[in-house]
Amino acid sequence: MNRFKAIGSGFIGFGGIIASFSYFVIFSIPLTALGLAFAILGCVILIFPEYLVPHQVVKGMISGSITNIEAMLEEFSVNQRAIYLPSKDGKIYAFVPLLGNPSYPEIREIVYAPKRVISNVDGHAGLFIYPPGSDVVVLSGAVAGQEDKTEQIREGKVSLEDFLPQLENTISYCLVDFSEFASKIRVNFDKNKIFLGIKNVKIDVEAPRFTRVLGSPPASLAACCIAQVTRMPVRIIEEKKEGKWVRVVLDVGE
């Protein structure tokens, strides 16, 4: 139990005892109100995380990481779209085929391949990259404690549409509330495709190669969220700007 939870629980317990004793034993309304105030304060403390990450820090972390990844992609002249994949350690990584091998290997082969910067996956040379959005999803705590439904999807018991409320909440929290990358998001499904609308993008990083391969920073972060929630591979197949909105189409599944 972290410090905030211990303090919050202590206030709730202390306030509950004071309020109960004052109301039922000594019949004191002022002391009852005081006890309730302590309990409410404890609840407020519990809803706050132990560490608050400022939006500026998140944007700075993302920008710095994008700059480094952009340089690496330029060095290898990479142009193919990345595949976002969940890992057992809770983070998201992306596999990017190198220019000489534009086709994609089997997803299962990618999952079990050694996670080196340059790796050969079933005869397909490619880069393994940890996108900056992976750390943002972890820091935000948006998917902490969520149930892994990968097996249910593969067995046909759960469809991607069943993830709609969870995905909307996770993507909205990461893009709008936690990182302040945008002011609003919309999520829709069509079979194995997700149609994402991002309004009023608030981060501008000059990284054309990164955008071509991994998507724009908001789209990349959204792809990380989707891969984390669904535990399925995700690929950005289209992204375009329409007025205040950025429309992103993502392919989900093997």
Image (spheres, rainbow, N blue to C red):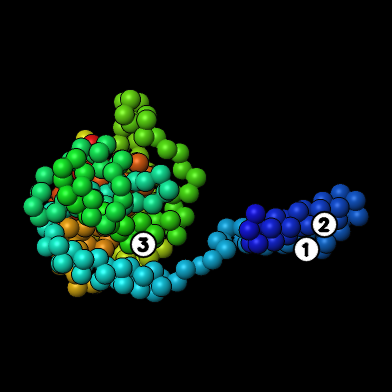
Residue type at mark 3 is Val
Helix or strand or loop: what does disc 3 sit on?
helix
Q: Give the vertical position of 105 relative to 73 (above or below).
A: above
Residue type at mark 2 is Ile
Q: Neighbour class for label 1 at 10 Å: few (<14), some, many (≥20)?
A: some
Helix or strand or loop: what does disc 1 sit on?
helix
Contact? badges 2 and 1 (CB < 8 Å): yes
Q: Residue at x 11, y 62 (%)?
A: 77
Count all numbered tags in the image, as a single digit: 3
Point out residue 39 in the picture as x, y percentages from the top left corner: 71, 57
Q: Earlier in the sequence, mark 3 or mark 2?
A: 2
Point out which mark residue 242 bears: none
Point out residue 72 in the picture as x, y percentages from the top left corner: 21, 66
Helix or strand or loop: what does disc 2 sit on?
helix
Q: Nearer the viewer, residue 202 or 226?
A: 226
Q: Give the vertical position of 193 relative to 75 (above or below).
A: above
Q: Residue at x 39, y 52 (%)?
A: 91
Point out which mark residue 34 bears: 1
Q: Neighbour class for label 3 at 10 Å: few (<14), some, many (≥20)?
A: many
Q: Nearer the viewer, mark 1 or mark 3?
A: 3
Point out which mark residue 176 bears: 3
Query: Mark 2 sits on what residue?
Result: 18
Residue 117 in view here: yes
Q: Neighbour class for label 2 at 10 Å: few (<14), some, many (≥20)?
A: some
For the C terminus, the image quarter is: top left
Instruction: Locate residue 6 relative to residue 188 in the image: left or right.
Output: right
Q: Residue at x 31, y 72 (%)?
A: 64
Query: How many angstroms separate mark 2 from mark 1 (CA)?
Result: 8 Å
Q: Nearer the viewer, residue 40 or 250?
A: 250
Point out residue 178 in the picture as x, y percentages from the top left corner: 41, 63
Residue type at mark 1 is Leu
